[in-house]
Image: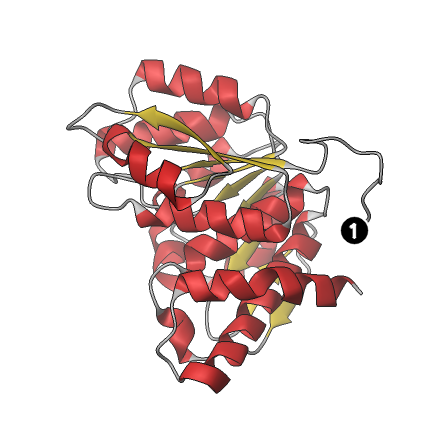
Amino acid sequence: MTRSSSSHKGENGTVAVIGGSIHQHGAPLLSALGSEASGVDLIYVAVPMPHAEVAKATCLNFQVHTFGTGNSDLISAADREKILELLATMDAAVIGPGLNMTGKNVTSIMELLEGCPCPVVVDATAIQPKTLRCLTGKQAVITPHLGELERMGLKVGELPETCKKYGCTILLKGPADTVVSPSGEIRTVDGGNAGLTVGGTGDALAGIVAGLLAQKENPVAACIAASTAVKKAGDRLRAKKGFAYTAREVINEIPVLLATLKE
């Protein structure tokens, strides 16, 4: 990716991350940190109201929006309207990490996916049986692990036809990541180690993909670059720390690794 020397703030990518619940504040923030590590200019996070202060403290570059109330993490109709207004100004978004999975909230999430006007990375709670139908005609990347793929009602062998039918890209996470393009082409990304099972690495991966989409990378290339960088980060950290590393440490490795991949 190239960048104009005369560009201004915001012209090199804006990303919104919609996520979090009363008991999960870290997932959307790790996604947002992943987007920051990809090199985007501006990051917006929408989290439940009780987590506004921790979101602000996580990074000075985060512009923090809230949904729900002081004791509720549900996305209301008024919240959806505000979030969709925010998404209309974004280059890419992540929807799903850490969101409450109650039936009423899942309905709100599906409505957000249907209304999302920008390229979107669909992760975690936003991966549901109805997700694909909500993404028709959109530039979308879905990032399931095997359990979430099962929740969608899909099998691995069905992914090429599914991606062709719905025009989406699927990044199936595992010991080897599988990237399936809208044309049904399959790419595999090897590497990494069992330390990457630590909580938050999938959230970070989703954020990196969204950051690359916001910088005009195509979805398949964004998935391959993000997956490769995360796996290489895991390998570098294992050499230094064994398996005792964190998702935040993985994110810290990403800028240099992405720069190396671009060369």
Q: Residue 71, how many percent across, how many down?
A: 15, 28
Q: Residue at x 48, y 32 (%)?
A: 134
Q: Residue at x 32, y 15 (%)?
A: 77
Instruction: Please give left or right for residue 192 compared with residue 30 in the image.
Output: right
User: Residue 160 versus residue 117: which sits nearer the camera?
Assistant: 117
Instruction: Please give left or right for residue 193 compared with residue 118 in the image.
Output: left
> Looking at the picture, does residue 197 appear above or below residue 78?
below
Q: Is residue 77 visible?
A: yes
Q: Is residue 192 visible?
A: no
User: Residue 138 versus residue 240: which sits nearer the camera?
Assistant: 240
Q: Residue 205, how many percent across, how many down?
A: 50, 56
Q: Residue 217, how many percent across, how many down?
A: 72, 47
User: Label 1 is placed on what type of residue?
Assistant: Met
> Looking at the picture, does residue 240 appear above or below residue 126?
below
Q: Residue 157, how many percent across, how many down?
A: 52, 64
Instruction: Please give left or right for residue 194 compared with residue 100 in the image.
Output: right
User: Residue 260 versus residue 208: which sits nearer the camera?
Assistant: 260
> Looking at the picture, does residue 242 appear above or below residue 178?
below
User: Residue 101 versus residue 201: which sits nearer the camera?
Assistant: 201
The image quarter containing residue 120 is: top right
Q: Which residue is mark 1?
A: 1
Give the colour scheme shown.
Answer: secondary structure
> Looking at the picture, does residue 113 appear above or below residue 80?
below
Q: Residue at x 58, y 76 (%)?
A: 190
Q: Quadrant of the C terminus?
A: bottom right
